[in-house]
Amino acid sequence: MEIKQSLNLKYFLGVLLLLNMFAFSMANKTIPSSINWVITEAKYARLCSTKKILTVNGLFPGPPLYVHKGDRVIVNVRNQAKYNITIHWHGVKQPRNPWSDGPEYVTQCPIKPGASFSYHIIFSTEEGTLWWHAHSDWSRATVHGPIIVYPKFGTTYPFPKPYAEFPIVLASWFKGDVMEIIQTALETGAEPNKSDAFTINGQPGDLYNCSKQGTFRILFDYGKTYLLRIINSIMNEEVFFMVAHHNLRVVGMDGAYVKPFKTNYIMITPGQAMDVLITANQSPSHYYMAARAYAGVVYDNTTTTAIVQYSGNYTAPSTPLFPNLPNYTDINAATNFTKRLRALASKEHPIDVPKSFNTELFMTISVGTRPCGDTSCSGPNGTRLAASLTNISYEQPEVDILQAYYRKIKGIYTQDFPSKPHYVFNYTADELPDNVLTPTRGTKVKVLKYNSNVQIVFQGTNVLSSAENHPMHLHGFSFYVVGSGFGNFDKKTDPKGFNLVDPPELNTVGVPKNGWAVIRFKADNPGVWFMHCHLERHTSWGMDMVFIVKNGTTKATSLLQAPPYLNPC
Ligand SMILES: *[C@@H]1O[C@H](CO)[C@@H](O)[C@H](O)[C@H]1NC(C)=O
Ligand SMILES: *[C@@H]1O[C@H](CO)[C@@H](O)[C@H](O)[C@H]1NC(C)=O
Ligand SMILES: *[C@@H]1O[C@H](CO)[C@@H](O)[C@H](O)[C@H]1NC(C)=O
Ligand SMILES: *[C@@H]1O[C@H](CO)[C@@H](O)[C@H](O)[C@H]1NC(C)=O
Ligand SMILES: *[C@@H]1O[C@H](CO)[C@@H](O)[C@H](O)[C@H]1NC(C)=O
Ligand SMILES: *[C@@H]1O[C@H](CO)[C@@H](O)[C@H](O)[C@H]1NC(C)=O
Ligand SMILES: *[C@@H]1O[C@H](CO)[C@@H](O)[C@H](O)[C@H]1NC(C)=O
Ligand SMILES: *[C@@H]1O[C@H](CO)[C@@H](O)[C@H](O)[C@H]1NC(C)=O
Ligand SMILES: *[C@@H]1O[C@H](CO)[C@@H](O)[C@H](O)[C@H]1NC(C)=O
Ligand SMILES: *[C@@H]1O[C@H](CO)[C@@H](O)[C@H](O)[C@H]1NC(C)=O
Ligand SMILES: *[C@@H]1O[C@H](CO)[C@@H](O)[C@H](O)[C@H]1NC(C)=O
Ligand SMILES: [Cu+2]
């Protein structure tokens, strides 16, 4: 409701100023729309039972945020539930404004039950599909929704305008209480419970008990082309997604356009969003769209479905036609897909990949263990699971790092996040010695000079023989994925294969299982920015770190002043 009002407000302003295009675009830029969200618990029935889940405005998935490129929006969040909460605007760069980025104890203290916070969301270069989600404990399981960024008024898509569009939000459903699941796992040191289902727009679909009735459906008119805005907000699994008998045409990813390519499936990691065109050119019938895991180590192996149903008069099959999804462990299928992603890099949508770099981080990614203390834990050999980046397992501080940085509060973090591992080993060997299992704990940040050109080599490891694909997500920036491969990164030969012409511009990159990925970005956004694996259990185990990007030399290249109200810790 509130969203419609804000669009109406913009429309009203537009009509008022229609004769003056300059003023119109100014009005569009400088008068922010304001939306009110309430965090509440609401009852939802899935998989034959009913339970209460945390929501925004009682909705699962949550309300979409519709904006145009370059807009500003204020979202007033009131917390009427019993948990601390924060909201993150995933993929929105928020130039100079980490104050509204959201990760708890990184850029803000949580919004406690009964409290409120106003997020000032500054859109800049993003165009396409992004999403928002809670960023405290595991509350994002149900507190998430799409962000749809339309082209600026007077401009259009770099592809024929679709007839209609549908957000396709993929999520996890747990029969138990998610907050209890992660709390128990952190106490015992063991793997958290797997989810019991995946959902498409809130519905598990026909393959689950008691779920047939609610299955999400899309109506297709023969000959028309539709835009699917596919968002992976699943907690712990990457997935393959397909629509039976139909080709997909990928045109955008993570709020930027890509060179269109045709495929019959996609592989999408938690944190990523894809814009996909689909043309209704098959025999009028009923078809399943389906998603299931691309294997990790421990995963939910169920399949979620929705139905594409052609309009018209025909005899539908008793069950819709089913897609032939790639197998859970099909690395070739995953790699073949991601290797095809290239930035559109057109005159209207140029890219700006750093051709060289002056700051480099070589970051190992591991899941290991740490000692339990006096008692025995339920992790491997009585230890507890611990994850790390460059052997540092992130420890959440008690005051957010942004506030500590801004107010110069001592003792909250240290500035010694290592630029490379202290100990070099064969990261992807089949067998690894026990001395690489246990990381150091700490709240360490890496300070970046304003405007430095940064290269990060993400190196997956086989520590604990638990190699899997890690979707690494950076706040405050998009980055270019200039290369990726299997085994250990070779700094002599691998850079020769880098794509510096049209690398995809993403905010979340899937670092291949027992492999590496290299990203580049310009550190032109002063502030405090979180970077972490988007598999939620890895985040909880410490697969996180923080960048501080220093002020530039002018006011216009410096952090914005703190807003008048900040939630206290
Ligand atoms: C986690 O799974 C175990 C074993 O299936 C079950 O007994 C327990 O109730 C689950 N925990 C929650 C919080 O759902
Ligand atoms: C569905 O319910 C039946 C009967 O209660 C049970 O045997 C079966 O395992 C359930 N299937 C799933 C996928 O939960
Ligand atoms: C999914 O995993 C369960 C064990 O967790 C197993 O019993 C079942 O056969 C698996 N299903 C598929 C389709 O692989
Ligand atoms: C659908 O087609 C059948 C067979 O051609 C015809 O008998 C029926 O009247 C049609 N129904 C509608 C609603 O047009
Ligand atoms: C998937 O695995 C099954 C069983 O291992 C195999 O029969 C099938 O050919 C595989 N499909 C693909 C597409 O690789
Ligand atoms: C991946 O691509 C290779 C080379 O083009 C091809 O041989 C293979 O069949 C593809 N595999 C899948 C699962 O698409
Ligand atoms: C568990 O203990 C065995 C025997 O001491 C050892 O070989 C193995 O590496 C240990 N695994 C872990 C994960 O600590
Ligand atoms: C590292 O381990 C892999 C897997 O066992 C092996 O193929 C490779 O040769 C090893 N590399 C080095 C430099 O020892
Ligand atoms: C990680 O740090 C711990 C504690 O300082 C150390 O014992 C271990 O050897 C380090 N591991 C690696 C791979 O550097
Ligand atoms: C950065 O610039 C802002 C705005 O000029 C200023 O308030 C702040 O003190 C500067 N330094 C830090 C560390 O935030
Ligand atoms: C909620 O946040 C406050 C402020 O940081 C903190 O003191 C409290 O422990 C948090 N509560 C929970 C349940 O995490
Ligand atoms: Cu991970």
Image (cartoon, rainbow, N blue to C red):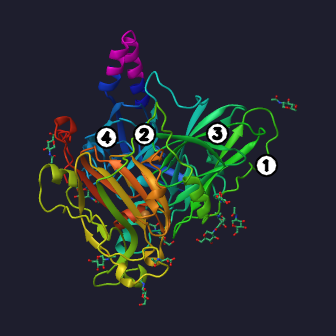
Q: Is residue 142 visible?
A: no
Looking at the image, which is closer to me, 66 or 317?
A: 66
What main secondary structure does the magenta stretch of the protein show? Answer: helix
The residue indicated by pointer 2 is 351
Is 71 placed above or below 422 here?
A: above
Q: Which residue is mark 4?
A: 94
Q: Nearer the viewer, mark 2 or mark 1?
A: 2
Seen at 38% across and 36% down, the residue is: 125
Label whose residue precedes the other's in the sequence (2 or 1): 1
Question: Which amino acid is tagged 3?
Answer: Ile
Query: Marks 1 and 3, Cα distance to the nearest angstrom?
Result: 24 Å
Q: Earlier in the sequence, mark 1 or mark 3?
A: 3
Q: Position of residue 206 (x, y in %)?
A: 66, 53
Q: Does the closest atom of ligand 6 sit within 8 Å of the Cβ of label 3?
A: no
Query: Is 297 included in the stretch rendered in magenta?
Result: no
Q: Whole-percent x and y of residue 122?
A: 32, 36
The image quadrant of residue 518 is bottom left
Q: Select label 2 or label 3 by which is in front.
A: 2
Which label's residue is closer to the chain start, 2 or 3? 3
